[in-house]
Image: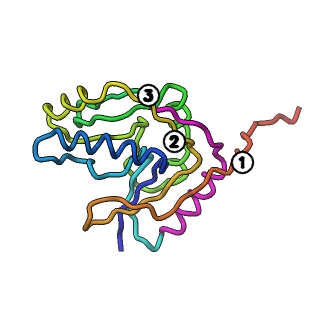
Amino acid sequence: MEKKYSVVFYSESIVGPVKNMKDLLKSKVPKNWYNSCNSEAHITICEFTIDDSKLDFYKQKLLKIANTFIPFQVSLNSFGSFPASNAFFIAPDHNSKIKLESIMKKTQNALKPLKMYKSSEPHMSIGRKLTPENLKIASELFTTIDLKFLCDQIVLREFDPVKKQFFVIDTFKFGSNPEPEFVQGSLF
């Protein structure tokens, strides 16, 4: 049976503070609801749909690639928006962004040839598909932020079609075992 999965950066240490922000926004917008208001804090790497019989194969790929990553501190220190999708999000600082992007690309490459949605801009959504009015409310409510977390794992989540939410099914800890870069040698 085909199921939808996502691979994300996730830390329980920031779930609570981000939930508080989402709840505050939820209380200020009409209908007390918006897209992503109930989603736990995460940074998406990719999403894909596969037959669940193939899942163990891709879990092994995630285990292998995660073993090569070295833990690092992520600093989330600004807000932003994507006007095309009316999304409001928390953004990482420059150094965190570079490290997150590198892991995102390597993880996406490790999962080839899966057809997947690939995130290219590391961000933590507060709300998606917000109306222009709700986007304005969010940008006025949230002006400063300083969240930090230790990025030491990637997480595999499965989509629950009834609850319409992803839930964690596996965690892949960073092993601090970077693979040596291949260097082309010469015979002479």
Name the amino acid type tagged 1. Asn
Instruction: Indicate which label's residue lies in the foreground, 2 or 3.
Output: 3
Could you tell me how far apart the alpha carbons at marks 3 and 1 are, in whole angstroms?
29 Å
Q: Nearer the viewer, mark 2 or mark 1?
A: 1
Question: In the rendered structure, are the residues bearing label 2 and label 3 in contact, judged by CB atoms less than 8 Å apart?
Answer: no
Q: Is residue 42 above or below residue 164?
A: above
Mark toward the start of the polypeptide (2 vs 3): 3
Which quarter of the image is occupied by the N terminus?
Answer: bottom left
| Rendering quarter of residue 184 | top right
Disc with the residue nearer the chain's start (2 vs 1): 2
**Residue at label 3?**
77
Pointer 1: residues within 10 angstroms few (<14), some, or many (20+)?
few
Pick the residue in front: 1 or 87.
Answer: 87
Residue at x 42%, y 71% (from the top left corner) = 52
Sequence-earlier tag: 3 or 1: 3
Please tell me whether residue 96 belongs to the stretch shown in magenta. Answer: no
The kind of residue tagged 2 is Lys
Q: Judging from the image, what secondary structure is the residue with disc 2 in?
A: helix
Stretch of the chain drawn in magenta: 55-76
For badge 3, the amino acid type reads Asn
Residue at horizontal 39 percent and vertical 53 percent from the top: 47
The quadrant of the picture occupied by the C terminus is top right
Residue 74, image x and y in percent? Answer: 53, 35
